[in-house]
Amino acid sequence: LRQTCLIAIMAQLGCKIPADSCTFTPVDRIFTRVGASDRILSGQSTFFVELSETAMILKYSTEDSLCILDELGRGTATFDGTAIAHAVVDHLVKRNRCRSLFATHYHSLIDDWNIDPRISLGHMDCIVTNNNDINSTFNSEPYNQDTEVTFLYKLCDGSSPRSYGINVAKLARLPNEVIEL
């Protein structure tokens, strides 16, 4: 997400960018809502800061802006987070009409928006292998301890066919007894 913003700035300045080709429309502003931080000494939780940043995006972005939002709504209950994320996407699409990249773990949001022609879904590609079956290379199989995921950092069309949280937990070296639970 951040690289998209950097490339937009570089292209707008006339710098060489890391791409074979690029179709580019200049932007008036770049807005980001990425990462987690708080202002606890000012009485502002991580979730409050997240929503304050989002409010600025909704208020000031235009159809010529580039907006990136990463995992909006994760600092609250799933139902509230999903509702907020859905309403923000709705506002960006219908009112601001800006170019946006919106990363989410709310699969219901994808179901809500996948039929809208103004929305293009994408996911980061990966290779899934099962150490017991060397020919296993796609990600529709159920998780088991022998499953290994290699993230490719390549953007592909469509929504992700499944979640890889357990695999990330393995990469982070959580104890097996935690992963198996």
Image (cartoon, rainbow, N blue to C red):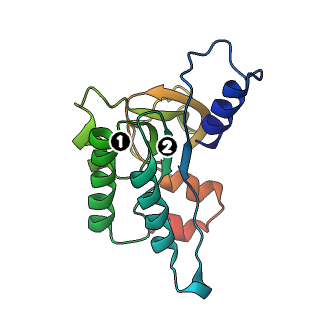
Number of residues whose C-alpha sits closer than 10 Å to that of mark 1, classed few (under 14), some (14–19) or many (20 or more): some
Could you tell me which secondary element the residue under label 2 belongs to? strand
Mark 2: amino acid? Cys
Q: Nearer the viewer, mark 1 or mark 2?
A: 1
Q: Which mark is residue 96?
A: 1
Mark 2 = which residue? 67
Q: Position of residue 121 (x, y in %)?
A: 38, 32
Answer left or right for 14 relative to 47: right
**Which residue is depicted at the point 58% across and 59% down?**
35
**Along the line of sight, the residue nearer the viewer: 138 or 168:** 168
Res. 146 in view: no
- Which dot marks residue 12? none
> How many C-alpha atoms fall within 10 Å of the one at disc 2: few (<14), some, or many (≥20)?
many
Locate the N terminus and report the quarter of the image it occupies.
top right
Q: Label 1 amino acid?
A: Asn
What residue is rendered at 61% in x and 68% in y?
Answer: 175
Marks 1/2 in contact by CB < 8 Å: the verdict is: yes
Residue 158 image point, x, y percent: 38, 29
Q: What residue is drawn where x is 35% and y is 44%?
A: 92
